[in-house]
Amino acid sequence: MDERSQALRNSELMPTKDSDRTLSLKDYTVLWAGMTINIVAFSLGAQYYNGGEGLSPLTLIFVVFLGYGLVTVLTAMTGDIGIKYGIPFAVYGRAAFGYKGAYLAGLIRCIPCFYWFGFQTWVGATALNLVLQMFFPGFNNLTLMIILFGAFQIINALFGLKAMAKFDWIAVACLTVMFGAIVLSICNVYGVTIPDILAIKAKGNYSFAFAVSGIAGGWVSMSLNGSDLTRNIRRNKDFETQSFFKRNKNAILGQVIGLMLVGIIAMGIGMIAGIYTGEWDLNAVIGVLYKNKPVFFGFCLLSVVLAQWSTNTAANLMPPAYILINIISKAKFWMMIVVSGIIGIAMQPWKQQDGDFLVSIQANFSTLLGPVIGILLADYFIIRKGKVNVQDLFTAGGQYEYTRGFNLSAMAALAGAFALSLLAGDYAFYAGLILSVVFYIAFMKMFTLKKHEQNLGKTIYFEEES
């Protein structure tokens, strides 16, 4: 094997064997629930209300349902790659973008991960800082807490996806208790009922398209990495002959429960808290409601810590680690986990806190990632019809070499779709997604497929001895 092919075969990126597929439906559901029941979801709910300028509670429920439903569909589609071939996004990107072109797609994907890891580490560290102040009056060292909490999360991520899923049980249980308590407290303190809350009106200054893209924006990034998760799910021996829905049944069910149901609840509770306390930061909400109840105040703050921990490890450390390994082939998984964590903290994203900033950031991320996932899905489902030459994904000079490692059709589609999407205003995400599919298919058929043989219609699995 030549050195270039060896560089494509980092052990962390190789196809998952059946013996390594250990996630059950329960594990996968809890994994998603642990990622979804996070403080960003809570804070987004409050910011979507935006002091009455944004969405009403009933409208938010509908918007979250559509946004997370869209994410579930996209993630199930990319997840099919993991179920069938056991390869992560960083590897399949080579098919659509070329061996080197996949670097660019991967780096674009990393941006939201770095941002959210840093932001959620700040939220958790703030909670830790408040906990320590309870025991050591006068203590206040948020910088130290950010460093320590970031380190704890990195260490947990090093133990792999199974360890993350097990840890999520604790986080989900604690946040369920806390969120339930918040709703009861608000109803008691402010003398309202759930029907009263659902009847609240808002001006609705967000367009419907923008609101949905803002919900989806935070998870389109995970849609790209759908195969990173599903490559660890147990599969039936006859998976090759099963229909798409039967093959991906556990992945879809896990997300419907863990993402859609949990997501609606988390954002709804965040909106309720925002309406009555005027706060979007969960740490501040906890202070308003429980400052005079030290035991429950401490429990809630520790729950915040666990919530950030369960989300950051699987959603914001693992994906960029795989991507960076693809770029730096001799790197180890643990090294890239550490690098990803350091970059996220160094970005200091918590310094931006102006108005409904989280909603805008989510929408911007959806615009950034829409063309990437559009190209990926067009390549897998339309160009290749789900049949992949996995061997060449790990063989330098193979069919994915294209032009010096770059698929120019993908590069042109990515640039064109993104540029035009910026002209679409609130419809930027949808425009980028649709245009990337159209451009990619057209460019591939007009140019690339005529010049580069792609073995279309053939499934070629990886064989180590080759």
Image (cartoon, rainbow, N blue to C red):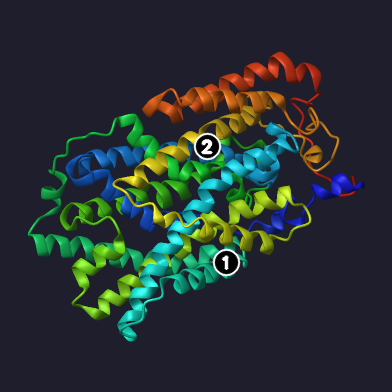
Image vertical order of residue 293 relative to residue 111, above or below: below
Earlier in the chain: of badge 1 and badge 2, it is: 1
13 or 459: nearer the eye?
A: 13
Which residue is located at x 77 percent, y 29 percent? 458
Q: Residues within 10 Å of mark 1 (few under 14, many from 20)?
A: many
98 or 75: nearer the eye?
A: 98
* Residue topped by disc 1: 154
Which amino acid type is shown beneath numbered disc 2?
Answer: Leu
Image vertical order of residue 170 relative to residue 406, above or below: below
Q: Is residue 270 visible?
A: yes
Q: Secondary structure at mark 1?
A: helix
Q: Is residue 15 visible?
A: no
Kindly identify which numbered label has been placed on residue 369.
Answer: 2
Q: Identify the image quadrant of residue 416.
A: top right
425 or 319: nearer the eye?
A: 425
- Residue that protrudes farthest toward the left in the picture: 191
Give the quadrant of the C terminus. Answer: top right
Image vertical order of residue 347 relative to residue 49, above or below: below
Measured as percent of width and height from the top left, residue 155 is found at: 59, 70
- Residue that protrudes farthest toward the bottom in the picture: 136
Which residue is located at x 49 percent, y 59 percent? 312
Which amino acid type is shown beneath numbered disc 1?
Answer: Ile
Q: Secondary structure at mark 2?
A: helix
Instruction: Using residue 242 as the reference point, say whether residue 60 is left or right of it.
Output: left
Which residue is located at x 69 percent, y 16 percent? 445
Instruction: Using residue 78 as the reference point, say whether residue 149 is left or right of it.
Output: left
